[in-house]
């Protein structure tokens, strides 16, 4: 189970090792999951939203990751 922890000092996401070490997930998948979980609750979940936050990565790579 993924857990989001928040208090006045810190906001964190706890991801179990089993999720990160899942052989069905690529490093791109794990990175995308981690990035999405780090976003604020009011973030607009869309491909354009992901692309705007990941400007250093190409659109084709981001689209493959989201569509996967």
Image: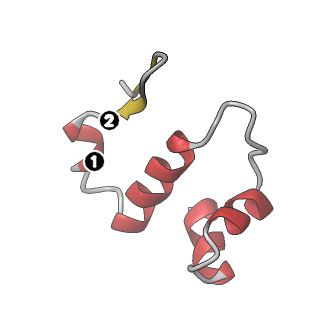
Residue 16 lies left or right of residue 42; in this view the side is left
Whether tag 1 and tag 2 are in contact, CB under 8 A, the answer is: yes
Q: Badge 2 is on which residue? A: 15
Indicate the quadrant where residue 49 lies.
bottom right
CA gap between label 1 and label 2 equals 7 Å
Name above or below for residue 57 compared with residue 53: below
SS type, badge 1? helix
Task: From the top left corner, tell me how far across and down residue 56 is, in percent.
Answer: 57, 80
Q: Are there few (<14), some (14-19), or many (20+) residues within 10 Å of tag 2?
A: some
Residue that appears at 21% across and 50% down = 21
Task: From the top left corner, tell me how far across and down residue 7 is, in percent.
Answer: 46, 16
Residue 22 lies left or right of residue 66; in this view the side is left
Residue 43 lies left or right of residue 23; in this view the side is right
Residue that appears at 32% across and 56% down = 24
Indicate the quadrant where residue 58 lies.
bottom right
Name above or below for residue 37 compared with residue 57: above
Q: Quadrant of the N terminus?
A: top left
Which is more N-terminal, label 2 or label 1?
Answer: 2
Q: Quadrant of the C terminus?
A: bottom right
SS type, badge 2? loop
Residue that appears at 64% across and 75% down = 55
Residue that appears at 42% across and 67% down = 28
Q: Badge 1 is on which residue? A: 20
Q: Are there few (<14), some (14-19), or many (20+) residues within 10 Å of tag 1?
A: some
């Amino acid at each position: 189970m993924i857990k989001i922890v928040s208090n006045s000092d810190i906001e964190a996401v706890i991801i179990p090792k089993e999720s990160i070490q899942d052989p069905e997930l690529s490093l791109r998948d794990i990175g995308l999951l981690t990035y999405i979980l780090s976003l604020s609750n009011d973030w607009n979940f869309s491909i354009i939203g992901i692309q705007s936050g990941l400007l250093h990565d190409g659109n084709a790579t981001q689209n493959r990751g989201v569509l996967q």
